Amino acid sequence: MSTPKTQALIIDDEPDIRELLDITLSRMGIDVDCAATVKEGMEYLSNNSYSVCLTDLRLPDGDGIELVKWMQKHHANLPVAVFTAHGNMDTAIAALKAGAFDFISKPVELEHLRSLINTALRQTTHQETHSENSPPLLGKTQSIDSLRKKILKVSRSQAPVYISGESGTGKELVARAIHYQGGRSDGPFIPVNCGAIPKDLMESEFFGHKKGSFTGASGDKQGLFQAANGGTLFLDEVADLPLDMQVKLLRAIQEKAVRPIGCDHEIPVDIRVLSATHKDLAQEVQREHFRNDLYYRINVIQINIPPLRDRQEDIELLANHFLKSFAEEAGLPTPTLAKNTLAALKQYPFPGNVRELENILERAFTLCDEDTIQLEDLQLPRAETQPSTSLTQRNDHPTDAIDSLDDYLEEIEKEVICATLEKTKWNRTAAAKKLGITFRSFRYRLKKLGLDVDEE
């Protein structure tokens, strides 16, 4: 029994373009229908079933973006890519915002075209079978349900997504869900913390380098863009990028190509860019700490993650999930939460969000004597505790220079941990004991703060 051939629709009023695309797609084993106008394209779409559609933006009887919007209403699951003039990013972004799957510049590069078509076809087949690698977003509240629906919708596109949310809300979790529910799920997911890369190594880390291109370049190095080829690059804490690196990043995203240090030509890369930060990126643009053109480019679609305090109904579900995970890892029975313990968790504001809930429960799991976690096991901070002079009057951290409470507290935590490690000669077990926290919790904090080192 023969399998039905894949169908594609091309809408363009230039006969040479239609012929080129027809030949290219036919060689890929795809049946092609061609239309020269919006009206003709709509007729094909109404009478046939397609796996992918390619359309020009300027057509004799209408606007390609309006056609994309019409397709969003009548053929929402059909990936549609638009042709744009080379370098015209404003038009490309407008098309992506309207619901286009992706864009391709004219003159058409056939390698890029084939890559785009293959990604679109994977998306079409992937819609029916979500990847098992997609992480679960736990919660029953309306805000989390809306978040799950938006993730599913944006996963059908290749548009850049900006994920905003407070520290600890799960921005990387959302990025992974977008990747694994989309057409790139078989490709790599490369997360990078932009604030953790030393400034003088950034260009090499992102774009790679050739052997001998600078002192210490003892061999060729593949950059993060090339490592993410065929998949997704997740730029976490993108607001921490210095301005000169933002310029280079913008060019790489727009040109879909990178030039490793010491290389005499650009290398094409096929990636989807997702980015996130706990800072107010629009405010960073106003303060001229972040480039407006890069903000415009990465913020085609924005997803906002609600803080945990706005979805208290999910706390019990999340708590039980974490406790079950800790118990399975330790090979112990899963403890339960006493009624007053659960009540206290629901009343606590969780400035550190889901990550803080996990840390609190991990500590409580270690401290509880029975199979029930009591209120005292949580060791929740007391709201009535007065701030100490060490936090309000530190000469090395003047409070009038604070941009973010999260950053301020994280810096203090880093200083305390580093000082303790120095006292214990970098013995992590001894340092954790001195700080009165579990080794597992201490190890987590090291990783979170970028201080993780292999113990001798």
Image (cartoon, helix red, strand yellow):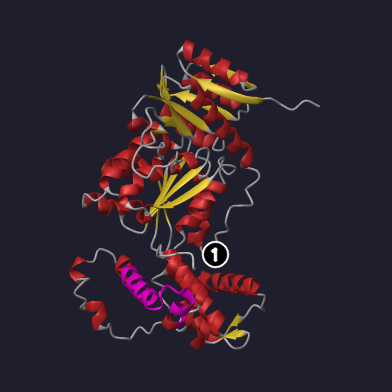
Image point 49% across, 77% down: which residue? 429
Residue lying farthest to the right in this orientation: 1
Is there any visible trace of residue 173 in the rendered image? yes
Measured along the vertical axis of the image, is residue 452 above or below residue 42? below
Name the side, left or right, on which 412 lies relative to 102.
left
In this view, 23 is above or below 209: above
Question: Circle 1 sits on which residue?
Answer: 139
Nearest the camera: 135 or 157? Answer: 135
Decide: is 215 above or below 59: below
- Callout 1: helix, strand or loop? loop
In the image, residue 426 lies in the stretch drawn in magenta: yes
Magenta segment's dominant SS is helix
- Which image quadrant: the N terminus? top right
Other-residue count near label 1 (Cα within 10 Å), few / some / many at <14 / 14–19 / ≥20? some
Q: Is residue 262 left or right of residue 444?
A: left
The amino acid beneath tag 1 is Gly
Residue drawn at x 57%, y 38% as measured from the top left: 77
Q: Is residue 451 magenta?
A: no
At 49% from the left and 48% from the top, the residue drawn is: 190
Pick the front one: 194 or 96: 194
User: Residue 249 or 200: which is nearer the viewer?
Assistant: 200
Q: Please report the bounds of the magenta region as a residue range.
A: 410-433
445 or 369: which is nearer to us?
445
Instruction: Name above or below for residue 272 compared with residue 340.
Output: above
The image quadrant that residue 5 belongs to is top right
Residue 105's spot in the image, x, y percent?
A: 41, 25
Dividing the picture into quarters, in which one does residue 394 lie? bottom left
Q: Position of residue 368 (x, y in %)?
A: 56, 86
